[in-house]
Image: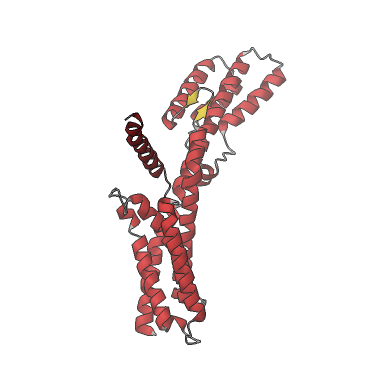
């Protein structure tokens, strides 16, 4: 009786463990990489057809295989654009969002093979090659997006932690404001030369700078860094000790610079996490326009 009672409990534990593993399964490995295997098999079959099926030597795109590949490619591209709408409906099962995303990734890679074979490797300065190039750009930006989502969230999380624990973006901003208030109050007795340096640090917008500054995390005109260097030189010229007022303000500015670097790193990672979409989505619409022009020109002018 005792051993019989334990079997269902073990079975339930195994089932729940399997369920937890499926929950944490990534979209790239979803369902034992079903869509990767299917896409790879289709790519192989289509490549073998292209190599071994006897076809006319010129205008491959006008052959039956060329039209077939073109139709498959066009339908795949249109289906791939549906992911944005699919994200609004989260459902479990075979057509869950994770399964759909997995299919989106691997069929997106397949479309590069289909499109290239459809072209018959004939490229030129025309709308047909433009559609092919835009297709590669869309797929390339999508691959960068996969890399971003696979690596940057971990880096974002690591950047939020220090010796005192985790800190959110809002808490970083509040910490900067608190440091600014402390520095402002401490700097009241300073002479004009030092006060100007501190004032430049307090007045500079931590979110200012160009898009390039945001994406690279490099701020060569950081007023806080400049104030620290100048105050350090000023202290040395006046032969002050570390216990004087300039030293205390320099220490506070150093803390502020550390928090600024942390916030800027956070914003940089967030920018990279989102930046690929500013290429992927607009170029997708450009691809659809070029693809439409390609289809119209083929059927009406060839």
- Name the quadrant of the C terminus: bottom left
| Residue 240 percent coordinates (x, y) | 69, 15
Q: Please name the residue shown 59% across and 25% down the image.
A: 254
Residue 168 image-quadrant placement: top left
Q: Is residue 138 visible?
A: no
Q: In this view of the protein, which residue sits in the foreground, 1 or 13? A: 1
| Colouring convention used in this rendered image of the protein | secondary structure
Establish if 161 lies above or below 291: above
Q: Nearer the viewer, residue 10 or 67?
A: 10
The x and y percentages for residue 271 are 47, 44
| Count of numbered circles on the image | 0
Given residues 6 and 295, the one toward you in this image is: 6
Residue 83 seen in the current view: yes
**Looking at this view, is 58 or 27 the one in front?**
27
- For the point 52% across and 78% down, the residue is 51
Q: Quadrant of the N terminus?
A: top left
- For this view, does 27 lie left or right of residue 255? left
* Residue under the point 71% across and 20% down: 236
Give the quadrant of residue 163: top right
Horizontal and vertical percent position of residue 42: 44, 68
What is the x, y in percent for residue 177? 45, 25
The residue that appears at 58% across and 19% down in the rendered structure is 249
Where 101 falls versus 241 (above or below)?
below
Q: Give the answer, above or below, for where 245 lies relative to 148.
A: above
Can you name the residue that lies furthest to the front here?
1
């Amino acid at each position: 009786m005792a051993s019989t009672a334990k079997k269902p409990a073990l079975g339930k534990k195994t089932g729940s463990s399997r369920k937890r593993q499926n929950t944490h399964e990534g979209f790239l490995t979803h369902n034992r990489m079903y869509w990767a295997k299917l896409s790879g098999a289709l790519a192989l079959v289509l490549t073998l057809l292209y190599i071994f099926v006897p076809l006319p030597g010129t205008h491959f795109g006008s052959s039956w295989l060329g039209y077939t590949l073109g139709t498959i490619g066009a339908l795949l591209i249109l289906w791939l654009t549906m992911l944005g709408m699919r994200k609004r409906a989260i459902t479990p099962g075979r057509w869950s969002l994770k399964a759909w995303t997995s299919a989106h990734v691997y069929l997106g890679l397949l479309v590069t093979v289909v499109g290239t074979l459809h072209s018959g490797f004939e490229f030129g300065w025309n709308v047909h090659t433009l559609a092919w190039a835009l297709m590669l750009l869309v797929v390339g930006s999508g691959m960068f997006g996969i890399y971003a989502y696979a690596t940057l969230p971990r880096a974002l999380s690591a950047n939020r932690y220090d010796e005192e624990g985790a800190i959110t973006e809002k808490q970083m901003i509040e910490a900067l404001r608190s440091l600014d208030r402390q520095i402002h109050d401490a700097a009241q007795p300073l002479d004009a030369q030092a006060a100007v340096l501190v004032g430049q640090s307090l007045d500079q917008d931590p979110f200012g700078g160009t898009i390039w500054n945001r994406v690279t995390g490099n701020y060569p005109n950081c007023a806080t860094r400049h104030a620290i260097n100048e105050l350090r030189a000023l202290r040395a010229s006046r032969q002050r000790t570390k216990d004087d007022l300039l030293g205390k303000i320099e220490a506070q500015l150093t803390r502020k610079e550390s928090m600024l670097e942390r916030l800027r790193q956070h914003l940089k990672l967030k920018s990279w996490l989102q930046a690929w979409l500013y290429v992927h989505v607009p170029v997708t619409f450009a691809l659809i326009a070029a693809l439409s022009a390609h289809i119209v020109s083929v059927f009406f002018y060839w």
